[in-house]
Amino acid sequence: MKRIGGYEIVGSIAVVDGKKGSRAVAEEILRRHKQVRSVYAKEEGRVGEFRVMNLRLIAGEDNAFTLYKENGCRYYVDLKKVYFSPRLAHERARVAADVKAGERVLVLFAGVGPFAIPIAKKTRTIANELNPEAVNLLKKNALLNKVDLEVHEGDAKDALKRYKADRIIMPLPHSAHLFLADAFKALDVGGIIHFYTIVERDNGLEEALEKAKIYAHCPFTLKNWRVVNNYSPAKIQIVLDLEKD
Ligand SMILES: C[S@@+](CC[C@H](N)C(=O)[O-])C[C@H]1O[C@@H](n2cnc3c(N)ncnc32)[C@H](O)[C@@H]1O
């Protein structure tokens, strides 16, 4: 068997790092994974206001719309129109397992719903998203999974003015800190914020905590944290679970 580098599979689509995206690699992926119908190379950078992947077809059908399964739920995804990464599956399961029935949960930056939909199976959940294409898929995915999910279309800042919550999920790692003060205002005392951020690999926890302290404008206790994934050779994505004091 040929050795080929890392790639991700989302339903019927394989996404390869642009530098490794040769025709030979794509054909090997198609041979190995019978469910894969399209192989795209992910070029550097992201496209448009919603920073969707910059994809170049290297083999198979040019169709970035697919059905993806994760943690017992199903999602329609269009990789050319919405942000999506399967790399957070474990983290999404961890957060959903922590939620208790009766909580009011607000999922900001919800995308097509992979955090919000499993949580909506347990408790009252509101999902906020700005990208109209993602909102459309989020609504379809709520129906597909038969969950009662309230969808708020618009900027997260507006959602934070409108709703009160016991738990707020903030998976926008480059700029979630800019929404942190408003999130703490929308949270009741004892509530939890899952704050995602990108930090240097060395001293990442200290850097993330410092950022939270600067931007929260509110006292909190760090309940838990973990490294979510590698962002680049020098940087990682980390999550802090913060309880409002
Ligand atoms: C990193 S993606 C996370 C998507 C999803 N939670 C997931 O895990 O796949 C961030 C999402 O936030 C949305 N977004 C960006 N800025 C926003 C804003 N100011 N208010 C609401 N949503 C926003 C983007 O369209 C994108 O879908």
Image (tube, rainbow, N blue to C red):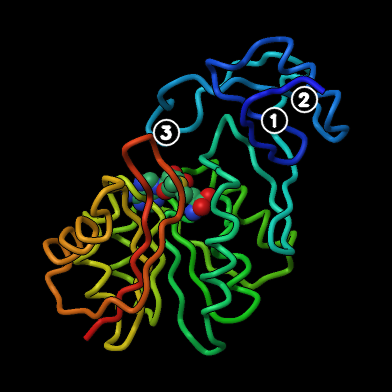
2 and 1 marks in contact (CB < 8 Å): yes
Q: Gap in Å between the C-alphas at discs 3 and 1? A: 19 Å
Mark 1, ligand 1, within 8 Å: the answer is no
Against 204, is 44 above or below?
above
| Relative depth, front residue between 196 and 139 | 196
Mark 3, ligand 1, within 8 Å: the answer is yes
The tag on residue 14 is 1
Where residue 93 appears, x then y in whole percent? 59, 66
Q: Gap in Å between the C-alphas at discs 2 and 1? A: 8 Å
- The tally of labels here is 3
Against 50, is 19 above or below?
above
Which amino acid, by three-letter code, is at mark 2? Ile
- Give the number of the mark in front: 3 or 2: 2
The tag on residue 51 is 3
3 and 1 marks in contact (CB < 8 Å): no
Judged left or right of residue 87, residue 39 is right
Question: For numbered disc 3, what is the local secondary structure?
Answer: loop
Q: Residue at x 69, y 51 (%)?
A: 75
Residue lying at the far top of the rendered structure: 23
Q: Earlier in the sequence, mark 3 or mark 2?
A: 2
Against 82, is 75 above or below?
below
Where residue 53 appears, x then y in whole percent? 51, 29
Q: Earlier in the sequence, mark 3 or mark 1?
A: 1
The tag on residue 29 is 2
Looking at the rendering, in which quadrant would you find the N terminus?
top right
Which amino acid, by three-letter code, is at mark 3? Arg
Question: For numbered disc 1, what is the local secondary structure?
Answer: strand
Q: Residue at x 71, y 16 (%)?
A: 25
Q: Is residue 111 visible?
A: no
Q: Residue at x 75, y 41 (%)?
A: 11
